[in-house]
Image (cartoon, helix red, strand yellow):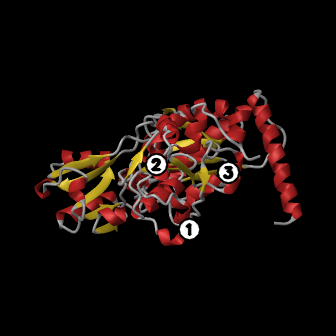
Amino acid sequence: MTPKRLTSRRSHGALRQLAGALLGLGVVATVAAAPLNVLVNPGDQGEQSRQASYLTLRAVLADALREAKIPEANWIISTDATADLATTRSQMHDIYVAPAHVVSSAVRHGYVPLVGNPKGAQAVLVAMKDRGLKTLADTAGKRLGLPLQDSVVTYLVRGELNAANSSLRSHYARVLNLRYQDALLVCLQVRECDVVGVEKAVFERWVAAGEPVASVMESRPAPGLSIAMRQSIAASGAARTLQPVLLRTLTGSPAVVRSGMDQLAPIEPREYEYVSTLGYFTPRQLPGAKVIDAAAVAQLMAAGAVYIDTRTEAEFKAGHVPQARLVPYVEKSAKETDYDSKLDAFDLAKLPQDKSAPVIFACNGAECWKSYKASHAAVKAGYRQVHWFRGGFPEWRNAARQVASAQ
């Protein structure tokens, strides 16, 4: 990128902030602020006509933006939630209209949710009644059918398995992804699938039609298609101005409901905690290790346990648990339970030589996989008292316990 383009981007950013500030004061901005970038991903509910759903949502949202004195926007249609997740981390777009897993990532990376249905999405694992599958454990080794890879249903099912310390690849003999959720019913009927994952509304429609299907597992409800705005713009007052306009223009429109947005209400960041932890956080358990909290860490260390900090040297120097031993886990593998440990580096020789001694592993909280992987490595190496401090240093610090620093 040339210096000229950098200057242009900074100028547009300054103009946009000025326009937002004026908007927050109830003044129509007269400066030529750069158009907002609005990404629209219709998600699963528009799966059979995403283009039509996109055009409907774009038209209604454009009217809402104009009414809120935000007249210009660059519109982007997306059918790839996986790519959208990456753009939230770099804040590439100003507004997201997207499924829960995309918006939850946006909320983690500097966005404010505006409107959505707090319980608009829920995944259900479904089997034919005559298969006798009653629990998630019963489906082990079976053939699973799912919507496409970036579907919120697939995301929720994969996340629930992850939370149970498993994965799609290790739990099922085969995973088949189909374009349409109703095609998954056919997959069950012709015995190509033993169990399938669909939205709860789809399952309920099958039951109402008399199909002999049963629920094997249900995820918790997650928000439906939602709208989020970048925090730096929302803070200027744009969110306060836009939110009631969105509720008025989107609510009750049959076309908007068909496009995947219904029962809209103001929505809070906490509504995305469940889907966020499923897709991003470590499992809640680890066979062979005991998950402990900050109080247990203090007790164990007072009794002589060794605390292994698996973070980077820079993080360790900035602050750590007193008496902690730094043994960085160099992570290049995927953040999932069936990760390839051969891609990583962890020096087991720096652990206590006595494999019966209690050892604590920690990093930067439940979303940090380094301590999970280090604990797993210790278990595999034969350590018999492995304690995984899943909350890690953030939990220790938030508990107002003593912090040491090398700076």
Q: Residues under labels 3 and 1: Cα distance?
A: 18 Å
Residue 185 picture quarter? bottom left
Q: Is residue 68 left or right of residue 215?
A: right
Q: Residue tagged by mark 2?
A: 388
Q: Which amino acid type corresponds to the residue marked 2 in the rendered image?
A: Trp
| Residue 250 - label | none
Question: For mark 3, does the 10 Å Cα neighbourhood hold few (<14), some (14 to 19), or many (20 or more) residues?
Answer: some
State the quadrant of the N terminus: bottom right
Q: Percent x, y for residue 124? A: 30, 49
> Quick one: label 3 or label 1, which is nearer the N terminus?
3
The residue carrying mark 1 is: 345
Task: Work out how far the residue at label 2 is from the one at label 3, CA to CA, in angstroms.
Answer: 19 Å
Callout 3: SS: helix
Residue plotted at (66% across, 35% down): 67
Q: Which of 216 and 338 lies nearest the eye of the viewer?
A: 338
- In the rendered image, residue 225, in percent from the top left (x then y), is placed at 48, 45
248 with respect to 339 (left or right): right
Q: How many labels does the image show?
A: 3
Q: Earlier in the sequence, mark 2 or mark 3?
A: 3
Q: Residue at (83%, 44%) from the top-left corner?
A: 15
Residue 148's place in the image compared with 367, above or below, is below
Q: 253 or 41, which lies in front?
A: 41
Residue 285 can be seen, yes or no: yes
Mark 1: amino acid? Ala
Residue 144 image point, x, y percent: 28, 63
